[in-house]
Amino acid sequence: MSGPDSGRAGFEEFVAARRPALLRTAYLLTGSHADAEDLVQTTLLRVVPHWRRIAATPEPYVRRVLARESVTRWRGRRWRERLVARAPDVPTGPTNERLALRGALARLSPRQRAVLVLRYYEDLTEVATAEALGISIGTVKSHARDGLARLRELAPEFLEDASL
Amino acid sequence: MSTLHDRFVDLAEEAPASPSPPGIWDDGRRKARRQRVGTAAVVAVTLVALTAVGGVGVHLSSTPPPVASRSGSAPALPSRIYEPSGWLPTSSGPPGPVSVVIPAHRSHWTSGYTWGLVGVSATSGRYAFLDLPDYGSEGPLSSDGQHLAYYTGTGPRHDQVLDGLAVYDTVTGRVVRWQPTLGRPLNVQNLAWTGSDALTFTMRAHGTRSSYFWRIGYGAPRPLMVHIGSLVGTAGTSGLYSVGRFRYRYLAVGSSSVANVRIEWPYRTLATPMAVSPSGRLVAAAHLTQRHSALLVGRVAQSGTRTKMRRVDAALQWPVIVGWADDRYLIVVAQASPQGYDAEGNDAARYALERVDVRTGSVDRISDVGSYWGTTVDYATGLLRTQTRDFPAPPDPMDPRLEVGLLAGTAVVGAVALVIRRRRVRA
């Protein structure tokens, strides 16, 4: 007789507690509700087989899967779709600042966007960002620098008064 | 003044707040299981393909076990001679007496091919390239198959200069070399065995052509007092040499006794090549022209009496004399397929080793020697009187470059399949 999987409870507890936060990060990474939910779902499915190993501290691994998945999964699709003018999802009346930031983020490369989100939303260090994305620290620095410059170029009226 | 972090936090407020879909744990485990099964299947298929490619390569390059024979390990000519593969191995040691030597392309990984000599063991029928140091060009095989003469060469492959002679002992592996100091390329002709341990040849040096006798293992070649031309054949230690138009000379090189022979031909043109029977009493020649071919036999006496050649009425196409089995049977290589010598598509003609009864003209086929390349084969003529034997076919190794390419290609296809599969599973 096989009882319930001993890892299931911990996993479901983690999902219940952390899914909203993961969705917020995924939304910044994708710029779309549907894509954010899809990205989180895919990430969680990929995490399940490794849960026993990471159950003690799942956050870094889950974040790594989420970030890398956002780059590899969306790079081919969203990065190209970005060139097609498409109105972003607007669930509730967004502010001008949100619209400007969302539009500017959508025009960054997937990796630039991931670096900025991990560095300035998740507040990860350069080392942790590099580890999460599987790239070098130098690449993190250059992507952060280029991404910020691009943001300022795309939304100058909004970001000119924002400090890092 | 807000920070970029604050802006991101504000934007993240737009994130969806949908409830967690049920069954993520079960779906995740199911998906992982499917992925493992799929990965295992791709790996298994790849391994099977790799094993198949490797297995084919091993099978083609494997040497079949020797065939048990009533005559045991007694030397014999093979009943069929196969065209050797350029990827045959080099004999790791002396192969023992060889029945046949075949000039063949030896293939290389990076540089096309070079010429080499493949020896066929007289006792096992095994094919292998002979390890001939500084091999330059082929020479004759002794009648007992123990000594192989060849020209040595120096310099790059495409611009090689022949600079000496060497004799490879197929039983001991010893190589005896002779490299005269000439200051220019070696110009040796009419190289032939007299008996099984001595060579005769002519060499042009200092403006004159001289004849030489070289007993292997007894120092350098010695000049002969008499001039010899091409060797017709040997009877014991005596050789019959061509010394001019219709004029021949029997020479016992050991004693230097000489007997002139004059042969009358039924044709105006000369017939070549020739062979003298082991007893020295009969001589045979093949007369080939564009329109017809004929086999001629005559009695020859060492006393210098005139010999008249008669035509043997044998049903043979374009015979090339290999030698005598005894005073009655002559062995020739003849075209076995119906096309004529100059017929279209003659490259595909088949040849066979035939035994001709010179008294009756009856012909027995004793060995299949393949296509035109079979006419370049050199035989241990001492075995012509023995029964041929069925030996296993030599290995035909797959081009190792193709094998490695197939293995690498299969591995790459397997790896790509794995990557594609992982991406599909992820999606």
Image (spheres, coloured by chain):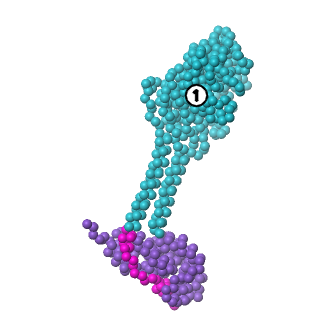
Tell me residue B398's x, y (percent): 52, 43
Q: What chain does badge 1 belong to?
A: B
Residue occupying image coordinates x 55% and y 19%: B325
Q: In the rendered view, does B31 fall on the left or right side of A1?
A: right
Residue B81 or residue A148, whichever sits in front: B81
* Chain identifier, colour cyan: B
Which residue is labeled 1 in the image? B352
Q: Is residue B3 magenta?
A: yes
Residue occupying image coordinates x 36% and y 77%: A14
> In the figure, A8 relative to B52: above or below?
below
User: Quick check: can you spot residue B5?
Assistant: no
How many dots with numbers?
1
Identify the magenta region.
B1-29
Tint applied to chain A in the drawing: purple
Residue B328 or residue A7, whichever sits in front: B328
Tell me residue A16's x, y (percent): 36, 79
